[in-house]
């Protein structure tokens, strides 16, 4: 390590930036996020520069550089290495001010790292000035890993610090308290935006001397492709102590769960019987009450035909904290993967999601007349077993038998199957392709577009 990382304290401090071009502007943008007084020394400034930082910077000509450098904590030379820049460098050296010269690490006292700014939490990645592009790419990876509200959590810790110190004088015990508070379920509350809740939980923990209660995250796992997980879902899966998952959650996604976390399948148990919904509620509540970070992982989006709403109500009714993380519903994921636009200005002005499976079994009592209206797309979930009746009822209600349909099984997964045809032939399409589900039925003109595109591409290829 040739460079020693350190952070400048910029409370009540002044800094100087030489230059009025794009480079200077970038540096001023970074500095403007700090409390520093910023003086920009410039003889010619780009249009819009002064306006962008109005009220935030003082602009001064080169002849006023001396007084500014006299009180500066550091200086940045961000103009091209011409006579003006050389003069600025000489002056900064005369005043003994630590200096950064943009794009010239050999002239720098310090380099400006690639920065992740989360308020009180700041991460800086440096490469000794040798590969700033590499630093930027590392920063992008870290950005995805650091919760957006980690700075709020740090600010909360800073507010509570005196109380914690007074309540727990022993250093080791205090560290244990912070480890629990800043990495456990209380931290999750803060990351979910409930800073007040996190503060209440931390104070309760402090008063009782016990570990915090757990939390349940109801998380959408998307249609199967792990790259379609949200960043939040990925983080929660990796932090969970226990994961209750549905049958629809793909193996690749389950492999992202921490090795030492418990995994509990609740979609189907031995003998092919679903775990009763009430039992799932009890399991989620009991695990959280043991102080665990619980993830309830559900296929697609938890609130679309997923009973996530019931789980949320039950968990909250038991006084357990809960959050919901949306997922990409299979309808959206499968359609996108198939290049099938669910709405289209020329073909479908509305989109309806329906279930093809009634609570008591069989076909549900749907409004067939409304589903038969033209210029709309109907996506049927759980409709493989009832496809014959669904097609029959929609045709009887007035939709043309020639209406295009698509059936997508295991969408976005390696074993995905797509078939295209007409509403009249829907049950035969399913039977012929041996589709058993999970599958979606897409009914409407848009379902014909991928097949048309394939046919067109084939024609062009042959021609
Ligand atoms: C209980 S629902 C859950 C839906 C889920 N919450 C969502 O937003 O996609 C299960 C149905 O979703 C559909 N489904 C889920 N994942 C799918 C996939 N990868 N490919 C096709 N259909 C899928 C099937 O219709 C399946 O029977």
Image: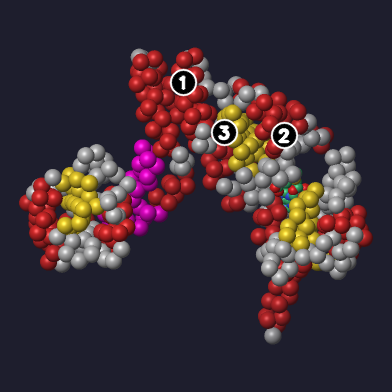
Q: How many marks?
A: 3
User: Hey, which residue is sitting farthest bottom in the picture?
Assistant: 463
Which residue, given by chain and number where applicable, does mark 2 sit on? 310
Q: Nearest the camera: 19 or 295?
A: 19
Which residue, given by chain and number where applicable, does mark 3 sit on? 240
Q: Residues within 10 Å of mark 2 (few under 14, many from 20)?
A: few
x and y, in percent, of residue 233 in the image:
57, 42
Query: Which SS class for mark 1?
Result: helix
Mark 1 → mark 2, Cα distance in angstroms: 30 Å
Residue 203 numbered tag: 1
Q: Which residues are magenta?
A: 114-137
- Quick one: label 3 or label 2, which is nearer the N terminus? 3
Does the magenta segment cover residue 133?
yes
Confirm whether residue 310 shows in the render: yes
Mark 1 → mark 3, Cα distance in angstroms: 23 Å
User: Hey, which residue is sitting farthest front in the picture?
Assistant: 55
x and y, in percent, of residue 411 in the image:
70, 55
């Amino acid at each position: 390590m040739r460079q020693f990382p350190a952070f400048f304290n910029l409370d009540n401090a002044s800094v100087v930036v030489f230059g009025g071009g794009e480079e200077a502007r970038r540096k001023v943008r970074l500095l403007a996020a700090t409390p520093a007084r910023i003086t920009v020394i410039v003889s010619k400034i780009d249009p819009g520069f002064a306006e962008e930082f109005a009220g935030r910077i003082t602009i001064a000509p080169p002849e006023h550089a001396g007084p500014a450098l006299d009180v500066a904590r550091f200086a940045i030379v961000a103009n091209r290495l011409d006579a003006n820049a050389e003069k600025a460098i000489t002056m900064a050296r005369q005043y003994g001010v630590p200096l950064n010269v943009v794009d010239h690490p050999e002239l720098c006292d310090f380099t400006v790292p690639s920065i992740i700014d989360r308020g009180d939490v700041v991460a800086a990645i440096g490469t000794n000035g040798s590969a700033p592009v590499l630093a930027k790419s590392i920063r992008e990876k870290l950005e995805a890993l650091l919760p957006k509200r980690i700075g709020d959590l740090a600010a909360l810790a800073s507010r509570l610090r005196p109380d914690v110190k007074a309540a727990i004088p022993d250093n080791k015990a205090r560290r244990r308290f912070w480890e629990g508070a800043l990495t456990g379920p209380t931290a999750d509350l803060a990351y979910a935006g409930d800073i007040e809740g996190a503060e209440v939980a931390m104070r309760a923990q402090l008063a009782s001397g016990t570990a915090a209660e757990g939390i349940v995250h109801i998380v959408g796992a998307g249609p199967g492709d792990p790259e379609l997980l949200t960043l939040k879902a990925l983080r929660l899966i990796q932090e969970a102590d226990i994961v209750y998952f549905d049958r629809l959650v793909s193996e690749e996604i389950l492999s992202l769960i921490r090795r030492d976390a418990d995994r509990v399948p609740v979609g189907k148990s031995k003998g092919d019987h679903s775990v009763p919904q009430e039992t799932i509620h009890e399991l989620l509540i009991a695990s959280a009450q043991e102080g665990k970070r619980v993830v309830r992982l559900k296929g697609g989006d938890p609130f679309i035909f997923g009973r996530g709403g019931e789980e949320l109500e039950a968990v909250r009714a038991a006084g357990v904290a809960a959050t919901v993380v949306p997922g990409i519903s299979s309808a959206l994921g499968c359609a996108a993967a198939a290049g099938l636009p669910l709405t289209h200005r020329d073909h479908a002005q509305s989109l309806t999601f329906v279930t093809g499976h009634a609570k008591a079994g069989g076909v549900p009592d749907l409004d067939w007349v409304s589903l038969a209206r033209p210029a709309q797309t109907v996506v049927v979930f759980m409709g493989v077993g009832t496809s014959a009746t669904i097609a029959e009822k929609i045709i009887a209600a007035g939709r043309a038998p020639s209406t295009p349909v698509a059936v997508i099984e295991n969408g976005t997964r390696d074993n995905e199957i797509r078939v295209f045809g007409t509403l009249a032939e829907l049950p035969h399409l399913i039977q012929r392709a041996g589709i058993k589900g999970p599958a979606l039925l897409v009914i409407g003109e848009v379902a014909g577009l991928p097949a048309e595109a394939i046919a067109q591409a084939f024609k062009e290829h042959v021609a």
